[in-house]
Image (spheres, rainbow, N blue to C red):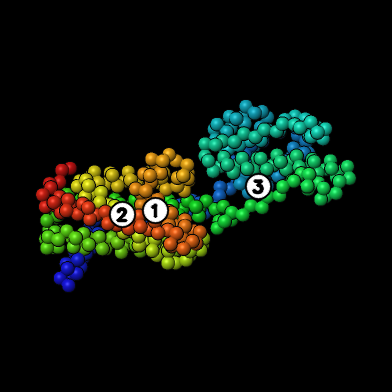
Amino acid sequence: MEVVKRIFRISLRECGIFAKNPIYVFCMVIFPVIVTIFFTSMMNEGQPLEMPVGVVDLDNSSVSRGLIRRLNSFQTSEVVARYTSVAEARQAMQRNKIYAFLYIPEGMSRDLVSSRQPKVSFYYSYTTLVSGSLLFRDLKTITLLGSAAVGNSTMTAKGYTPGQIRAFLQPIQLDLRPLNNPWVNYNMYLSNMLIPGAIMLFIFLISAYSIGTELKFGTSKEWLAMANGNIYTALAGKFLPQFLIFLTIMLGYMYYVFDILQFPHPGGSIPILLLAVLTVLSSQAFGIFTFGLFPSLRMSMSVSALWAVLSFSLVGSAFPLSAMDAPIQAAANLFPLRHYYMIYQISIFNGYPLADSLLYIGALCLFIILPLFVVHNIRRAMLEFVYIP
């Protein structure tokens, strides 16, 4: 019972520190809320829409104008300019006025009717992966539609039935079924990795910062005295208020994306609640562990920030981890965000049972016990180390 009272008194002391130091309010509440609203609003449409496209139409026929009208009708493309030459269109692309352009050579419609296979070219920038792949899809589709339209007219004039025409123009019919995200909404893919990763970054930093400032402001011995010299009691009292605040923020983020924005979550509420608790605890534990390894405010925060930033590259959402080199695949297991993303992907996004995520749940539990290996180093630093700016 005495231990509980000490934890409570240290927690009250920590709340007083929050009130005096605005960095806690910004990093624990304001910045996570801003990040959540920023990323979900930035990708609110799901996909980039009406990206600027140019046209070089040297044929200027009814067929070429029909192709341009169809291209402009696509949701992701908008024909914003017509150019007289490829060089002019290329310069516009280099100046980022357009992301792609369609080149229709002179005599295209005449060659189509004569079955001479005219060559239509399209140029697109792959500087940005998403815009490049989407515009490539639109431009390729529009050229295939143009040839199909001419083929349809020719075969109709020769007396073929609609069934024969369809079998000739499209011998294999494709049936695409994107599972769990049929809209191919990038917001649902990326926000569920970027926002938790940013929140984990703030937890890493605040965890290391809150211990390091005890040394910086010369209050470390007072902190330990309130815990009767027990470092476990001291850490529990210090991080209990932070845990409650960050857990509230994490649950608020999940409520916002899953209930208000209606992101798919067939796995239900239990995996969501479990993942929120494990995420906050493992992130706090990693920040404590970092300070235990490097008992310096500056060094521990630098390592925490570096670890959080690297985790965005190794999480496996933008580029599959299985396609990376074996050493990098092994190193990815050292980042809590990787295990967060796998639990989310398996048990929340795809709705598979939690038993399929046990390996990653166990990995986050291992992160939670990391401070046990450095806790005595933290105690020694609080009693013996002198802060050096």
Foreground disc of the pair 2, 3: 2
- Amino acid type of the residue that numbered disc 3 sits on in the rendered structure: Phe
* Location of residue 68 in the rendering, given as x and y in whole percent from the top left corner: 70, 40
- Residue 125, position as x, y percentages in the image: 56, 35
| Kind of residue at disc 1 | His
| Crowd rating for badge 3 (residues with CA inside 10 Å; few <14, some 14–19, many 20+) | some
Which amino acid, mark 2?
A: Phe
Residue at (86, 46) in percent of width and height: 160
| Residue 34 position within the rendered picture, expressed as x and y whole percent measured from the top left | 40, 54
Whether the residues at callouts 2 and 3 have beta carbons within 8 Å, the answer is no
- From the image, tell me which residue sits under label 1: 339
- Taking depth in this image into account, of 245 and 314 the one nearest to the observer is 314
Question: Which residue was labeled with disc 3?
Answer: 74
Residue 184 circle label:
none
Q: Which residue, given by chain and number where applicable, does mark 2 sit on?
A: 367
In the displayed structure, does residue 328 sit left or right of residue 234? Answer: right
In the image, farthest residue toward the bottom: 1
Disc nearer the start of the sequence (1/2): 1
Contact (CB < 8 A) between labels 1 and 2?
yes
Residue neighbourhood size for the residue with mark 1, other residues' Cα within 10 Å, grouped as few (<14), some (14–19), many (≥20) = many
* Label 2: element kind: helix
